[in-house]
Amino acid sequence: MFIGRKFNSLILSSLRCNLENSFQFYSVFPPNYIKPIYKKDEQEALYQEETELKQFSHSPVQPAKTNNTCSEFHDELIRKFTNYIMRKGDKKMARKILDETFENIKIKKLNEYYNTPPEYRENIILDPKVIFYQAVENCTPVLELQKISRGGIAYQVPIPMNENRAQFLSMNWIIRTAQNKGNAEKLSDVLAKEIIDAAKNQGRVIKKKYDLHKQCEANRAYAHYRWL
Amino acid sequence: MTVLIFTRFTKMRNLMNIDNFGTVRGLLNIIQRSDVISKSYSTDAIQQIISDKPDKFSERKINKAMKVYLERSREYKQFMEKQIAEYNIGKRHLAKIMGEDPDNFTEADIDRAITYLFPSGLYDKQAKPMMIDPTKMYETRKEAEFDEAGRPHHFLFYTLNPNYYEVLHEIVGSLNRLDKIEDQMLAKKIQPSSQDKLDIVESQWIGKPELEKILGEEIKDKDFEYFIKSMDRLIQHPVSKHAESFIMKFRKKLLFINQHLVVPKPEYDSDNRPFILVEKCARKNARGQVKVIGNGSGKITINGQDITSFNDIQCREQSLRSQSRDNAYKKLDSSSVLIESSDRTTGS
């Protein structure tokens, strides 16, 4: 809070001056303001790096956002997934759904664990977070199709994409597939099922990925339209 | 080959005493040096010696454009002198009107006096009456950048941005110098270490307006980018420390953030426990106050309730954030009271 007040009185006024003089940008903070490091392990890692620490001590830092927390339950990928689930800005609901989903995953996995004979139990992963990571990784596509028109004809051209886009598609497919459900079913139940399936490299999402890859393979003849 | 023949030829001419000014030279007894090739157009000195009326010649030498320029600069100087004199007299009058010392009447005093004597309800600054130093009022004109013969003083005058290109020229010069230094070091079998490299963490490049101020001329965005690129290359040189004085002219020091950060000192309550009280913490429309007490047991009080007064988990995480550094939440108590809020409930 103190820092917040300090920020309002000292930095914000000078920021407004800067805004008038220099170019237009969309954030309140000029580009030389760096993002805060709010996780404890990252902070400790920063202390190891001498040059980075020096840089950090000389550049102004943006205030931490409301969803930034150093809680040990915080995870960057899960935070992103929550935001993808969220509809109409209802983050409370999105978080509730995800918590229930992880609970369901845990229950299902524990069921599986106790139903298998003790000698095979070692291979079963119980941690929902690990299963979630596995699922996202398995669903990540390599190529996607893009419409490119050449000579008046639109071709479906297979193109590679960057990591962010691939990760987004992977997570979005999981959510979209889970939303494709009957009225009686709950989203958290279906989502749990999809994630467990995807972690095993099975299920509807994985099929979707394979379909896309198959189509890309079929359209490989058009691949050169990407640059020609 | 041709040069050789030419010099020989001139020597022969000298020997035979045949040249373009043969007769004049004979009269004035000018000895021509054999290693100087005489040129018919570099005759200023000779003409001045020869001529009986030097004024006539110098008048003819100045071309029309130059004449116009001289006329204009003379007019400008006269005008400015008049304006400054008027301003100084006016200032003294104003000081007398206001009953102050005319010798120590500053610009701030003038502004104050003008706003007092001519009150104006207009908002536009340009529409208000003002009394400004003429040197600030009228734009200063550049002094002549060329001599009487029309020859520019600066060797890069015809690039249109002589100072900018001079800096670029200096960059290349210092790059070459650094290369030489590095070569010398390598010849002595000394590897350049990190100490020879300039430390750039604590400073950053100046912006375009600042560079323009230093150079005294307007430059394009593209040129500024090129300048930064070139300077970056100079900085990346392994012995860039040797060009520090040149580089640092174009870098500004970054502030050490902690310099302006005042950490509040804790007060002590009756149980000798340290505490910090922050009042009127603003969050959107809500105002609250927070008290963090040391030597505690990790108790959290929000509006008289514990942390469960927040239904949202994100809010609970937020209320713990201030304490969770260095696992301090086990030792601290904190209480926050919401003073006023329009619609949202926010604690810390």
Image (spheres, coloured by chain):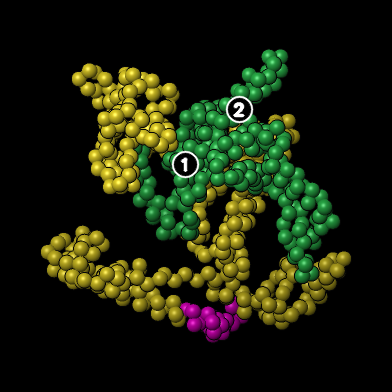
Chain colours: A green, B yellow
For this view, does B339 lie left or right of residue B199?
A: left
For this view, does A39 lie left or right of residue A10?
A: right
Question: Could you tell me which chain the residue with mark 1 belongs to?
Answer: A
Q: Residue at x 72, y 74 (%)?
A: B39
Q: Residue at x 59, y 72 (%)?
A: B151
Q: Main secondary structure of the magenta part?
A: helix
Question: Could you tell me which chain the residue with mark 2 belongs to?
Answer: A
Closer to viewer: mark 1 or mark 2: 2
Give the magenta range. Answer: B48-70
For this view, does B117 lie left or right of residue A108?
A: left
What residue is disc 1 on? A93
Quarter holding residue B131: bottom left
Quarter holding residue B98: bottom left
Specify few, some or many for label 1: CA neighbours under 10 Å numbering under 14, 14-19, or 20 or more.
some
Q: Position of residue A75 (x, y in %)?
A: 54, 33
Residue kind at label 1, given as amino acid type:
Met
Q: Position of residue B340 (x, y in %)?
A: 25, 43
B309 magenta-colored? no
Q: Are marks 1 and 2 on the same chain?
A: yes
Q: Residue at x 52, y 34 (%)?
A: A100
Quarter holding residue B25: bottom right
- CA gap, disc 1 and disc 2: 22 Å
B59 magenta-colored? yes
